[in-house]
Amino acid sequence: MAFSVVWVRPGEVLFVSQFGERPRPRSGGGAFLRNDYGGLLFGNLTPFGYTAVGAPWPVAVSPVGIVAGSSATEPPFDGLDDVGGCMSFGDIKSATHDGRTLLVNGRPFVSCKSPALAARWTGWLTELKALPPEDREQRIVQALTRSYDPVEAGRVFASCREQTTNLRRASQVLFGYCYLAFAGLLLGYLTISLSPIFIGYGMLILLTFYEYRRATRAVGRPDAEKAGWMLLVSPADAFRAADKLVRSIVDEFHPAAIGVGVAGMTANDSFVRRAKLDLLYPRPRPRPRQAVDRRAAEVVDWFTTVTQTAIADKLGGVELNAPEREVEAIMYCPRCEMQYIRAGTCPACAIPLKPFAAPVTVPPPKSAQPGSARPAAKVRVRPRHRKRRK
């Protein structure tokens, strides 16, 4: 059970399917252990299901430069470098990664979801630096739109699942073999020596290791072959080898795209609507210790505009109609739809409130409307009591 735990950071969503059922989204709010930087959630407990993690971009990118964190990530965005401004592409000399930490010019810049995602960002920043500004803008818009495309997310997920079929079957056979062998030894049904049991276990481990190396080449992840050596010493890693490999590839898509393309949700689902509102009305970011660079604000504004365009293009617009108005309310929060009786800022979302379009009108009672008949007055009739004769 401990090996199925997944670390989920703010803004990320874990989709869990136990036995081929419809994946269910789980966010960091339901974590059993959490802090300001994320929480621990249980994934699939057996190798017969799968998990997928959707994460927003950890970096705001524009043709001018990059900023650690973006409007799509909830604070704290886990930016490691103490820079409140923008790092232009002309100032980027090198882009590497150390684990899941993205290094720019040899300094930690931002922490990504996984080492695989950090490796992709390393290659992508190197590619953007070599492009001219006009081609760079087109490449950024294309990549950002792809991360919100549910059709592309479903295609990539289905392709990875198909290419890791043999690895998944080997992991399932290994899981069943270990479970039955352990249960048989514990209950005393197996009276043979342990040598045949360990020989069978070793053969299955080697088969899983071979299929893992073969699957990493098939999905285009040769850098993940180093993690395959852990399969030889850790059965828990061998059980979920296919799940981890697929999860490391799908994490480049936004949770809303995974929810529609993989989990089968609709564009009007409450989870997708909430994801859209989080992007259209992001929470204010914490102020850095130094003054905010004007270029950084321009990068984030450009990135937010392109993000909203990608949402409308791939996920459809969200109906931002005002909620059903209460009698005394004059303002409402467009993000959580709470209503208030005075202007100000929403205490939960920390964004300005919006007024209702028209003043509330309370219809008069029917008795006060012209042309209505006046209701008859109720007359209380006292019963007569006869006097008793003495």
Image (cartoon, rainbow, N blue to C red):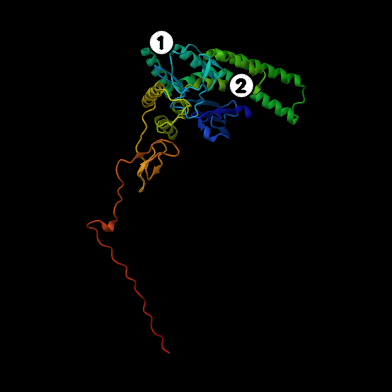
Q: Is mark 1 on a helix, strand or loop?
A: loop
* Residue sitting farthest toward the left: 371
Residue 314's spot in the image, x, y percent?
A: 38, 25
Residue 336's spot in the image, x, y percent?
A: 42, 38
On the image, numbered disc 1 is attached to which residue? 131
Q: In this view, does 210 lie to the left or right of 102?
A: right
Q: In this view, does 176 lie to the left or right of 134?
A: right
Regarding residue 308, the answer to whether it shows in the image is yes
On the image, numbered disc 2 is attached to which residue? 171
From the viewer's perspective, is residue 63 above or below residue 176?
above
Q: What element carries label 2?
A: helix
Pick whichever of labels 1 and 2 is earlier in the sequence. 1
Depth order, front residue of 101/146:
101
From the viewer's perspective, is residue 325 above or below residue 88?
below
Residue 342's spot in the image, x, y percent?
A: 37, 44
Q: Callout 1: few (<14), some (14-19), or many (20+) C-alpha neighbours within 10 Å? A: some
Q: In this view, does 24 lie to the left or right of 279?
A: right
Q: How many angstroms separate mark 1 from mark 2 (CA)? A: 43 Å
x 39%, y 14%: residue: 136
Q: Which amino acid does label 2 sit on?
A: Ser
Quadrant that contains the C terminus: bottom left
Counting labels gives: 2
Q: Callout 2: few (<14), some (14-19), or many (20+) C-alpha neighbours within 10 Å? A: many
Depth order, front residue of 206/281:
281
* Residue sitting farthest toward the bottom: 390
Residue 87, label in figure: none
Q: State which quadrant residue 185 falls in.
A: top right
Tag 1–tag 2 contact (CB < 8 Å):
no
Depth order, front residue of 65/280:
65
Q: Which amino acid does label 1 sit on?
A: Leu
